[in-house]
């Protein structure tokens, strides 16, 4: 029996689902080992009987909570895919300010009745048990296929515990931080093969943090290389601004730091 698989989406750009759809070169092999019963972006069928739910996006609307709980109740395994689902992601940038204030600003005083929003955008794990996470913004298609292979084999998908800096060193990418470019690779979780620094772009920690991130050292390194600790805090807010994720760095790198 092939495991039945379903895909769902909450507050997101749906870029992670697009990554899944980009596996067309191995689609016949994939469909020979799993049966897809629900995938709004790809098919009309809406099956409610599934073993594995892949869920993208963060919780942003009141209705999202009950919908996710229903998915959790039906799925044997729930996998969060992407930064939005695992960390709050870019949606959680709004968590620093009251949602009513933001709605007023964005909708110019006409926000009443336009939409209902939760006070905070939050990751799936804030409401239900998440069995596995596939990190990244967006996720990597190969990593997704590896995770499917592990789940079918009954093993745990591999998540590297170390920093992006390790992957930079392994592939011989010169350190951006040492050139005064604000890179978060020393605290960011690896697994992307340090793709951004390899192209000269600083890491923004879209995969969250590795197991022993030293935020104080990150702030000091920014300062030593001519940048402020406040800049480090601003960058950490991009993908990692959900309350419980933020608590990890906020004390060591306060956003109101004068230096
Ligand atoms: S993690 Fe990134 S690519 Fe995936 S849905 Fe969120 S914003 Fe889009
Ligand atoms: S280098 Fe950093 S920002 Fe870029 S994909 Fe990897 S973890 Fe994400």
Image (cartoon, rainbow, N blue to C red):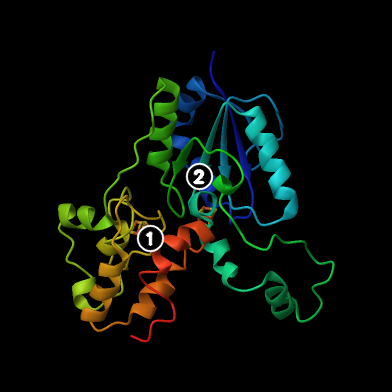
Q: How many marks?
A: 2
Q: Quadrant of residue 1?
A: top right
Other residues around mark 1 within 10 Å, as few (<14) / some (14–19) / many (≥20) = many
Q: Secondary structure at mark 2?
A: strand
Label 2 lies in ligand 1 vicinity (Cβ under 8 Å): yes
In the drawing, does residue 25 fall left or right of residue 222? right
Q: Nearer the viewer, residue 43 or 131?
A: 131
Tell me, yes or no, if residue 40 can be seen here. Answer: yes
In the drawing, does residue 216 fall left or right of residue 242? left
Residue at 30% across, 44% down? 160
Q: Secondary structure at mark 1?
A: loop
Q: Nearer the viewer, residue 98 or 235?
A: 98
Q: Which residue is mark 1?
A: 205
Q: Quadrant of residue 205?
A: bottom left
Q: Residue furthest top?
A: 1
Q: Could you say which disc has been placed on residue 81 in the image?
A: 2
Residue 98 placement (x, y as % from top left)? 66, 72
Residue at 50% across, 41% down? 20
Residue 87 placement (x, y as % from top left)? 49, 54
Residue at 77% across, 61% down? 116
Q: Quadrant of the C terminus?
A: bottom left
Label 1 lies in ligand 2 vicinity (Cβ under 8 Å): yes
In this view, 37 is above or below 114? above
Q: Residue furthest right?
A: 113
């Amino acid at each position: 029996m092939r495991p039945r698989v379903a895909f769902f989406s909450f507050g997101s750009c749906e870029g992670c689902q697009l990554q899944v759809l980009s596996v067309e070169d191995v689609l016949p092999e994939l469909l020979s080992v799993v049966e897809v019963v629900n995938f709004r972006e790809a098919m009309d069928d809406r099956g409610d009987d599934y073993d594995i739910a892949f869920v993208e996006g963060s919780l942003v609307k009141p209705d999202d909570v009950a919908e996710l709980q229903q998915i959790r109740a039906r799925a044997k395994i729930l996998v969060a895919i992407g930064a939005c689902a695992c960390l709050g992601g870019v949606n959680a940038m709004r968590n620093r300010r009251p949602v009513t204030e933001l709605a007023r600003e964005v909708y110019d005083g006409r926000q009443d009745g336009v939409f209902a929003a939760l006070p905070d955008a939050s990751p799936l794990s804030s409401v239900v048990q998440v069995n596995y996470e596939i990190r990244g913004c967006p996720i990597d298609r190969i990593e997704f296929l590896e995770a499917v292979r592990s789940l079918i084999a009954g093993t745990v998908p591999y998540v590297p515990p170390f920093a992006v800096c390790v992957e930079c060193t392994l592939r011989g990418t010169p350190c951006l931080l040492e050139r005064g470019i604000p890179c978060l690779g020393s605290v960011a979780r690896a697994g992307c093969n340090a793709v951004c620094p390899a192209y000269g772009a600083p890491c923004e920690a879209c995969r969250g943090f590795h197991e022993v991130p030293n935020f104080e050292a990150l702030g000091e390194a920014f300062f030593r290389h001519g940048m402020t600790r406040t800049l480090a805090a601003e960058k950490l807010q991009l993908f990692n601004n959900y309350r419980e994720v933020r608590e990890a760095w906020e004390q060591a790198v306060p956003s109101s730091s004068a230096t």
